[in-house]
Structure formats: structure tokens, C-alpha cells
Amino acid sequence: MPFAYFNNAIVPLEEVTISPYDLGLLRGYAVFDFLRTYKGKPFKLTEHLVRLRKSAAQLMLPIVKTDEEITEAVLEVIRLNAYPESTVRIVLTGGKSMDSRTVLSPTFYILVDRLTPTPSEQIEKGVRVKTIENLRTNPTAKSIDYQVYLKAIQQFNDEGVAEFVYVHQGNVLEGATSNICAFFGSTLVTPKLNVLPGITREVVLEIAAPHWHIEERNLKLSELLSADEVFLTATNKEVMPVTYIDGTIVNTGTPGPRTKKLVELFKEYTKNS
């Protein structure tokens, strides 16, 4: 029987009941953060909690739990569910509101699920991505608004697209569920403005810095299409090579040597964390 943390207690998942008047449902007024475990331990939990608080502050949602309380709850739910490896989703909503506008008591819950590993074929051969014109309302907050992404999934469901990449006024921003990076020779470039600061992205930049020059700056779509190598970073994607963008082949259409090295560096980093 799976367990979850709901407001102030750990309960069986089937006992979690969210009010139909919750502002997260009625108004989409909610934030979350998402992480995974390695060797059963939550990866970069402190950094994810910092980002969760920043997201909540941007939406003016109060978090009444301390980091210590949240950490204790995360560890206990991971222990009780006892999956080989887990994903952890921490959610904060505006809570029940009978007038659909007043925040009285936010809803706070933690879901722990079995991790589904990234298919090895995607890492070995790379994936296809499709660009979509979109600038999120609060780009640096991890809100629950994924309307554009979910609509795109329905629209392009049969095109073999692994991720949708947001572009605004010609500038590449981020993936719907990831960050995007590109190699131009020995320079690693990743967009800086109007993106969610990914935790995996920060780790990748850290481990890449001793080997390549790093630039965080605007990245034009036309420039991305001429990159030597392109890859995504995310909790559930780690370092994911991109071989096609909107049907345009990236270089030779196979994961490049620098991206492959980053895949191995990231594996080593998580192994030793």
C-alpha cells in the first residue's frame, strides 16, 4: 500500500482527499517541486526546497512547514513506500476557499512514486524535440500550469517527440519539463533569462566547468539549429542527447562526444553523492 504525506500526517495514498474548492483545482493556484532518489536518498533535496520556497514566494503562497519538517516527511514516505528508487513530488496549493479567492489554509502534500528509469536507447541514440512558441507567465516559478505542454502532447502525440522546447521571439528558452543546452565547439551554452533554474542543469554546469567554457545567455533558435551538440537536463531525463529539432538533424544525428562525456560525468557525480 503506497503512502503519502498530506497536510500534517503520513496516510495511505487512497485516503488523500483534496477539496473540490481547492484553489489549486479551481484557479490553478499552486506550485510544486520534483526530485528523485539515487541509492534511496533524495538528490539535492535542500536545493529543491530552496526553489520550492522561491516559487511559493513569487505566487505569494505561504509555506508553514520548516525545511526540517519537510525533509523528515520526505524521508519517511520514501522509507514506507520502499521502492528501489523513487520520485518525489512536493505540492503546495492555495487550499480550500469557498469564495474561490481567499487563501486561508494552504494544502501541502508529498507524493512518492516508483522511479521509471529513462530508456537506455534514448541516451544512446538521442531524442527528437519540437519547438513551440510560448513564454510562461512566471518562468522562474515551478507552477502547476502545464496547459501548453499537455495541449502539445495531444496535438503531436504520434510524432515521436520526446520533449517540447519553448521559444519566444526567436529565443530558445527551456523544455516544457527540462532545460536545454548546446555545444558550439568547446563552448557550452544554455539560456539564462525567462527559464526555470533547473537543479540538474546547475549540477551539469558545475561538472562541465572544468572541461569547457560555459556561457549562460540568450540563444537564438537559428543558432541552436547549427549547434554541434544539443542536450536536455532534467530530474527524470538526467543528460539527454537531442538529435533532431523540428525534423532538422543536429550535426550527424547521433549523440556527440562532449554530451556522451557529460552523461558519464553525471553518472559518476550521482554515484558519489
Image (cartoon, rainbow, N blue to C red):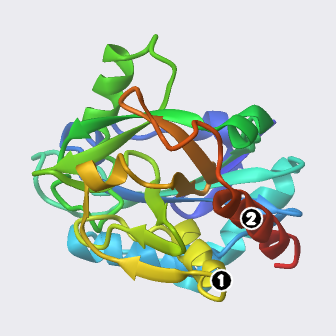
Please state, as top left, top right, bottom left or bottom right, where the N terminus lies in the image. top right
User: Visible in this render: residue 175?
Assistant: yes
Task: Name the residue that disc number 1 marks.
Answer: 211
Please state, as top left, top right, bottom left or bottom right, where the C terminus lies in the image. bottom right
Image vertical order of residue 155 relative to residue 51, above or below? above
Residue kind at label 1, given as amino acid type = His
Instruction: Please provide percent x and percent y for residue 258.
Output: 66, 63
Q: Residue furthest bottom?
A: 210
Image vertical order of residue 135 relative to residue 12, above or below? below
Looking at the rendered structure, the number of numbered marks drawn on it comes to: 2
Circles 1 and 2: CB distance less than 8 Å?
yes
Q: Tag 1, which secondary structure?
A: loop
- Front residue of 264/203: it is 264
Real-space CA distance between mark 1 and mark 2, rounded to the nearest whole angstrom: 10 Å
Task: Name the residue that disc number 2 marks.
Answer: 261
Q: Quick check: 270 left or right of 199?
A: right
- Front residue of 31/197: it is 197
